[in-house]
Amino acid sequence: MAETRLAFKAGRLFRRGNTNFVDADPTKGAILLQNGEDGLLHFIWKNRSTNEIEEDLILFPGDATFAKVEQSSWGRTYVLKFSSSNQRHFFWMQDADSSRDEEFVGNVNRLLADPSIVPIWYSEGYNPNSAGPSSAPAASSSQASAGSYQATPEELARIRSIVSTLGAGGSGGQAAAASQPPPEISLTDVLTPANLRPLFAARPELAQALFPHLPADLPSPPTVETLERVVSSPQFRAAVRNLDMALRTGLLGGLVRTLGLPEEAGVGVEPFLRALQDQARREEGDGGDRMDTD
């Protein structure tokens, strides 16, 4: 099964005849980098309106780069170019927030050089374009310390706000909350070691249920301590961040159906979490603690 390593919103641009000018196509799209079933890296452009793949380029390590087009007056135009040919593919960033452009481009180029690497993500709120002399990126990479993670008071406050937003019902007492937009939900705020450790302690049977889905080189039999090490690892944090980014593209409808969720759960982080919450409630009504595994 193909593994999506990176995904973000982007449109295409096409050459204007035989000139060096390019024109933007307004079609909503997304760039996906996938490790394909053939063992090769695929650079994919998918139409977000039709969910159809319209470009699928097979890339070999070191053969391509993804670079900013400096001549672009708009500033968010990029080109995929090859060292082995004169082939060029132009793209423009479609996310309204430009603060993460460099982060996505950096990860694209790291994967183009080595498809096996773990993408590097900046810490929440860090913008390389606005950082002052004393600022530095707190990136999460495979060299980060797995056991040093601690939820900050700000993160805990944000989680409490997220939970209260998800659980709020009715209109009573909502006037004050309505004056402020709810915080944007992120899987990296929810699937933290601080949140998951109490769950593993309260439900030790999860170790047995989750073990078939974990890397094969983990010690056996499965234990709660093994799960705690997994969720504290940089690889797990990177996987959560990749899933978060993929959900934000709105292109995971087909994937979430394999999890027993409705297709609309794949169009964003909040619909995904709500669908999981609804699924858990239904299973509790059907028989309590029963968990199906395959």
Image: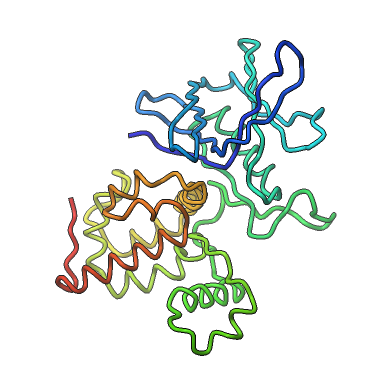
- Farthest residue, direction right: 133
In terms of image quadrants, where is residue 208?
Answer: bottom left
The percent position of residue 273, horizontal first and vertical second, equals 41, 63
In terms of image quadrants, where is residue 110?
Answer: top right
Compared with residue 32, is residue 224 higher up or lower down, i.e. above or below? below
* Front residue of 99 and 193: 99
The percent position of residue 266, horizontal first and vertical second, equals 41, 51
Q: Looking at the rendering, in which quadrant would you find the N terminus?
A: top left
- Farthest residue, direction left: 287
* Front residue of 206 and 175: 175
Residue drawn at x 62%, y 22% is 89
Compared with residue 56, is residue 137 higher up or lower down, i.e. above or below? below
Left/right placement of residue 106 relative to residue 251 reads: right
Count of numbered badges drawn on the protein: 0
Residue drawn at x 82%, y 58% is 134
Residue drawn at x 42%, y 60% is 271
Left/right placement of residue 252 relative to residue 203 reads: right
The percent position of residue 242, horizontal first and vertical second, equals 49, 47
* Front residue of 145 and 212: 212
In terms of image quadrants, where is residue 215?
Answer: top left
Residue drawn at x 78%, y 57% is 135
The percent position of residue 95, horizontal first and vertical second, equals 63, 47
- Farthest residue, direction bottom: 173
Coloration mode: rainbow
